[in-house]
Image (cartoon, rainbow, N blue to C red):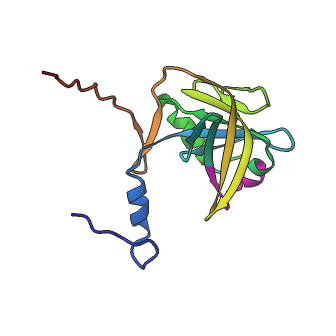
């Protein structure tokens, strides 16, 4: 039986990362445009649905991110849920490189946010709220428009990119 650990109690700080890594997440690229109108984006796996009525989503960004000022000033953002074959894009947008959109097929949404072609789903959002908590800012967005395709999504599990394997439904026999 596994023992309980207490965060920040002198144990290995990587333990909590290992425990959190057992929760598989989708992989997204969150995008916006800078005050100068340039596209900006970053890989994010903290995306989640908050509410269906009204349709709200959230994601979080480190206070140490060089992209933080761009997203704090943005009134809109887009969430591009990456498809399985977009691992290279996930890695590209996770790096601190300039001009991340060079060579990336994308269009601009209704409010100018970059939408990456080939994504499994895209959500165009109005920034509804920002909450500071711990070492992150949590962005809540109201979904204004969305679209989705039947592409297999890219997921992140145990610190690695992975694929979803669907399990056939188990039918119960009734007497």
Q: Identify the residue at horizontal 59%, vertical 38% (top origin).
A: 51
Q: Is residue 111 above or below residue 71?
A: above
Q: Position of residue 12 (x, y in %)?
A: 40, 72
Relative to the observer, which residue lies in front, 134 or 29? 134
Q: Which residues are magenta?
A: 60-70
Quadrant of the drawing holding the N terminus: bottom left
Q: Quadrant of residue 143?
A: top right
Quadrant of the drawing holding the C terminus: top left
In the rendered image, residue 80 lying in the magenta stretch gets the answer no
Q: Is residue 55 above or below residue 150?
A: below
Is 127 left or right of 133, judged from the image as shown?
right
| Furthest residue toward bottom | 10
Relative to the observer, which residue lies in front, 143 or 14? 143
Q: Quadrant of residue 137?
A: bottom right
The number of callouts visible is 0
Q: Position of residue 48 (x, y in %)?
A: 55, 42
Q: Quadrant of residue 47?
A: top right
Q: Identify the residue at horizontal 42%, vertical 44% (top origin).
A: 24
Q: Position of residue 72 (x, y in %)?
A: 77, 51
Is 5 left or right of 98, judged from the image as shown?
left
| Furthest residue toward right | 36
Relative to the observer, which residue lies in front, 93 or 172? 172
| Furthest residue toward front | 175
Q: Identify the residue at horizontal 57%, vertical 36% (top origin).
A: 89
Q: Identify the residue at horizontal 52%, vertical 40% (top origin).
A: 27
Q: Position of residue 50 (x, y in %)?
A: 58, 42
């Amino acid at each position: 039986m596994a023992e309980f650990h207490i965060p920040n109690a002198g144990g290995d700080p990587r333990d909590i990362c290992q425990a959190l890594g057992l929760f598989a997440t989708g992989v997204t690229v969150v995008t916006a445009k800078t005050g100068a109108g340039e596209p900006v984006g970053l890989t994010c796996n903290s995306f989640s649905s908050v509410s269906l009525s009204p349709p709200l989503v959230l994601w979080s960004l480190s206070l140490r991110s060089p992209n933080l000022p761009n997203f704090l000033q943005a009134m809109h953002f887009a969430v591009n849920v990456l498809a399985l074959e977009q691992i290279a894009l996930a890695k590209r947008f996770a790096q601190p490189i300039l001009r991340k959109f060079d060579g990336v097929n994308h269009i601009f949404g209704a409010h100018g946010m970059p939408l990456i072609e080939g994504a499994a789903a895209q959500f165009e959002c109005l920034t509804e709220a920002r909450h500071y908590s711990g070492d992150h800012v949590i962005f809540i967005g109201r979904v204004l428009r969305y679209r989705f395709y039947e592409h297999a999504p890219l997921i992140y599990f145990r610190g690695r990119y992975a694929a979803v394997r669907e399990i056939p439904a188990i039918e119960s026999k009734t007497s």
